[in-house]
Image (cartoon, grey):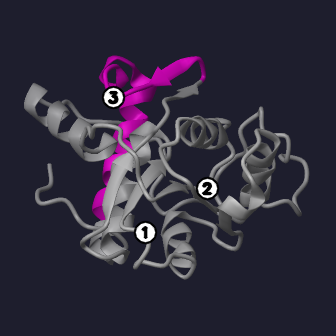
Amino acid sequence: MKPIIQKEIDMPQLSPEQIDYITELTFGKIEKIKSCDAIFVFAGTHPGHWEKAIEAYNLNLAPKVIVTGGRSLTGESHPDWSGRSASAETEASIIISYLVKAGIPEENITFEDQSSNSLENVLYAKDLIDFKKITSLLVICKSHAAGRQIRTLQKHFPETMEYIPFSFDTIYKNTTVSRHNWMNSDLGKKRVWGEYQRIVHYGQLGHLIPPTEKL
């Protein structure tokens, strides 16, 4: 099954102002890192998902970790993911195994392992969260997906919830896609333009907070 919106789409010629707008929308606002009530880990097979969660926990940025992820129906496993050949293992179970190995107590980890996309990550995790005790989340995700995934959280969680991105850059075919260099490579442009199109599309479907303007 292919995703409704492809992850890599050819980007048209954009002005510097449009490049800035796309960057802010897809990578999200730059927030000062600070302590939160919990760490929210979006599903994925990239090592960054557990490495950033472990880093955040060891920095005492949050006392609890919320892990999401069944098996993606569309994505390909990262080559470094040890569970890539074990179809019965969920993304959450693999992430948790690394967290526990790093010394994070299991009683400090809450998880859902039935979701297959970002929207389900949020909806299924929603049942795990006591909003009387958790009002801020440190969000672990790929940097160029932070805007879309935080907008999904904003759509379905209380308006009073605060989100601090703690994201990681990714490398595709030896090309790093980051907030500062994505516009300098064809692959970076395709990845970020694909993210922009997904934000617009899923915003129209009501899955996330839609952008205020479209290019």
State the CA–CA distance, disc 2 to disc 3. Answer: 21 Å
Disc number at residue 179?
3
Q: Name the residue nearer the viewer: 186 or 171.
A: 171
Q: Which mark is residue 77?
A: none
Query: What residue is shown at x 77% (from left), y 43% (from top)?
Result: 98
Task: Indicate the amino acid at tag 1.
Answer: Ile
Name the residue that disc number 2 marks: 43
Q: What residue is drawn where x is 40% and y is 35%?
A: 190
Q: Position of residue 112 (x, y in %)?
A: 67, 71
Does residue 182 show up magenta in the picture? yes
The answer to whether residue 209 is seen in the rendering is yes
Q: Amino acid at mark 3?
A: Arg
Assess disc 2: are there few (<14), some (14-19) or many (≥20) residues with their C-alpha within 10 Å of its C-alpha.
many
First-in-chain label (1 vs 3): 1
Mark 1 → mark 3, Cα distance in angstroms: 29 Å
Residue 178 percent across, percent down from the top left: 40, 26
Dots 1 and 3: beta carbons under 8 Å?
no
Please state which of residues 92 and 105 is positioned toward the viewer in this rendering.
105
Disc 1 target residue: 134
Q: Secondary structure at mark 3?
A: loop
